[in-house]
Image (cartoon, rainbow, N blue to C red):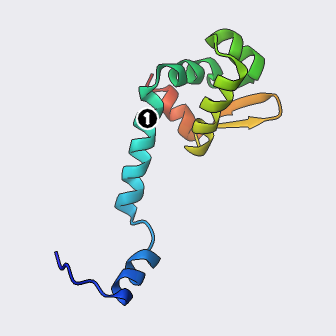
Amino acid sequence: MDQNIDDDDLENMMMRGTSPREAKTGDHDMMFKALGNPVRRKIIVSIGAFGKSLAEVMKETGVNRSQLDYQLDFLNKGEYAVVEGDMVRLTDKGLGLLSNI
């Protein structure tokens, strides 16, 4: 690898963004992190294919509201779950995770 990168080369590298390979690797990393956490797995299973209220998910999983919010934030950033008012549902990607639990 060429160690002599000039400013123009560096700017071009920064402007090109994420390659498809890098994006796919990032998706896989996020999926493994989502499935690797036992609390997240319980939450995904609790939400299920039809969605549930936040209160139902808390009751079924035994987590408090701050823990649930933290985990749902992770799942939302990964595009696995969506919170709409008091309801939470899995996205298509989230349903893919559910089928792997």
- Looking at numbered disc 1 in the image, what kind of residue is underneath it? Lys
Quadrant location of residue 64?
top right
Q: In the rendered image of this protein, does residue 2 appear above or below residue 77?
A: below
Element type at mark 1: helix
**In the current view of this chain or complex, which residue is farthest to the right?**
85
Who's the residue at 46% across and 78% down the image? 15
Q: In the rendered image of this protein, does residue 41 appear above or below residue 91?
A: above
Q: Is 55 left, or right, of 12 in this rendering?
A: right
**In the current view of this chain or complex, which residue is farthest to the left?**
1
Who's the residue at 44% across and 48% down the image? 27
- The x, y position of residue 62, in whole percent, is 64, 10
Q: In the rendered image of this protein, does residue 71 appear above or below residue 92?
A: above
Q: Is 9 left, or right, of 37 in this rendering?
A: left
- The x, y position of residue 51, in whole percent, is 70, 25
- The x, y position of residue 55, in whole percent, is 77, 17
Q: Is 42 left, or right, of 17 in this rendering?
A: right
Query: Looking at the rendering, in which quadrant would you find the C terminus?
Result: top left
Query: Looking at the rendering, in which quadrant would you find the N terminus?
Result: bottom left
- The x, y position of residue 26, in whole percent, is 41, 50
Write down the residue under mark 1.
33
Quadrant location of residue 4?
bottom left
